Amino acid sequence: MKEKIAVAYSGGLDTSVIAKWLQEKYNAEVITVSANLGQQKELVGIEEKAYKTGAKKAIVLDLRDAFATEYIFPALKAGALYEHTYPMATSLGRPLIAKALVDVAKAEGCTAVAHGCTGKGNDQVRFEAAIAALAPDLKVYAPLREWEFKSREEEIEYCQKHGIPVKATKENPYSIDENMWGTSIECGILENPRVAPPEDAYQRTVSPENAPNESVTVEIEFENGVPISLDGKTLAPVDLIMKLNEIAGAHGIGRLDLIENRLVGIKSRELYEAPAATVLHFAHRELERLTLDKDTMHYKAKLANDYADLIYNGLWFSPLRYALNAFVEETQKVVSGVATLKLYKGNISLLSRWSPNSLYDESLATYTEEDQFDHKASIGFIKIYSLPLKTYYRINGAPIPEQEAMAK
């Protein structure tokens, strides 16, 4: 029986080679599956490009709304930033693409699916873990783990030989992945962490030095943890994210240069551009400071790291992620209000925040004559709070200063 393979197809260098290589290697019929997650450039002419590789069918799916509401916003509400920094645009897109790939494979009667992930990257795990959850019996091909090409330069030559148009060149060999939540850039000179990123590596932001000399103010309204309006205008999720990408990117917001810990155990140097994600995480966090009680806020900060790890490590469809999401949703019932920010040459400044659910009580916080806090109540509070320490050291002796203890 002839193989019929659904290929996750971005139109980039690797997947362009894969579509042709699978036909040659397995005499397979290839169906390409491309997902529109808000990327700006790679979708242009992608069907024509797929057919030039010999694909029997080229399917392009508009998944922007699902990506924003079902993947981006849950991560935003969780405060999920991998290693406290990366908003995980690529990581969030992979489970959705994997789901689309599985859906197409089932509908088209495919015997297998294929992805363009390397053998030392995170995406191979994200794709295959998602496919294992959604279609455990479906065969998965990962050509980059087994084919003969040793470098991107060899892949470029293969494309040139077969007349496959690709954007990558030997002089500009960046590997770029883009969606509405951010852009990932790697390879080439970026593999040397001692080298500053060349300006031509960046795709959607201006350098802070070249940003306007005048700041811009943005007002973002949230409802139950979800951004719903920008500068007083209600916008659909995709429109809000894309508009904020445009505004913040023009002011140099959202450039990240990270040495991160990959799932497979190596460190990698990655450039990220995430203008809207950076601004929205900032604004959301400030509203949480205003609306969440202390214990919930502190516990949620711990959980946010675990939530981010699950996304980064490809476990979006895991029972644990669903369970953590239930906790997050409960916390977001009070995270409504408005944050006003100033964007200026790569920096975000908070100007004001307001919420109908604000726990900030000026009559308790003030040091003026309007102060309603009962200062005398602190006497008993401190006695009880410090009683365990007092009891311990009364019995065991006062603590020895660390320098004295080390000297002994």
Image (cartoon, helix red, strand yellow):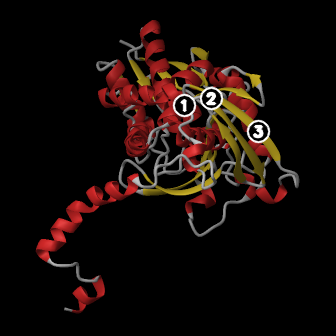
Disc 2 residue crowd, few under 14, some 14–19, many 20+, Cα 10 Å: many
Q: From this view, report whether residue 260 is shown above or below residue 13.
A: below
Left/right placement of residue 369 relative to residue 31 reads right
Q: From this view, report whether residue 22 is shown above or below residue 166.
A: above
Reading the image, the residue beneath label 3 is: 218
Specify the label residue 395 is tagged with: none
- The percent coordinates of residue 28 (x first, y second) are 45, 20
Q: Nearer the viewer, residue 217 or 52?
A: 217
Please indicate, yes or no, whether residue 28 appears anywhere in the rendered image.
no
Q: From this view, report whether residue 252 is shown above or below residue 64.
A: below
Q: Residue at x 50, y 44 (%)?
A: 81
Q: Residue at x 49, y 51 (%)?
A: 84
The local secondary structure at tag 3 comes to strand
> Which quarter of the rendering shows the C terminus?
bottom left
Q: Amino acid at mark 1?
A: Val
Q: Residue at x 64, y 20 (%)?
A: 51
Q: CA distance from mark 2 to mark 1?
A: 7 Å
Q: Amino acid at mark 3?
A: Val
Please indicate, yes or no, whether residue 84 appears anywhere in the rendered image.
yes
Disc 3 residue crowd, few under 14, some 14–19, many 20+, Cα 10 Å: some
Q: Nearer the viewer, residue 23 or 44?
A: 44
- Circles 2 and 1, Cβ within 8 Å, touching? The answer is yes
Dividing the picture into quadrants, the one containing residue 52 is top right
Dividing the picture into quadrants, the one containing residue 136 is top left
Reading the image, the residue beneath label 1 is: 335
- The percent coordinates of residue 128 (x first, y second) are 37, 31
- The percent coordinates of residue 308 (x first, y second) are 43, 41
Nearer the viewer's eye, disc 3 or disc 1?
1
> Which quarter of the rendering shows the N terminus?
top left
Q: Amino acid at mark 2?
A: Phe
Specify the label residue 222 is tagged with: 2
Left/right placement of residue 166 relative to residue 359 reads right
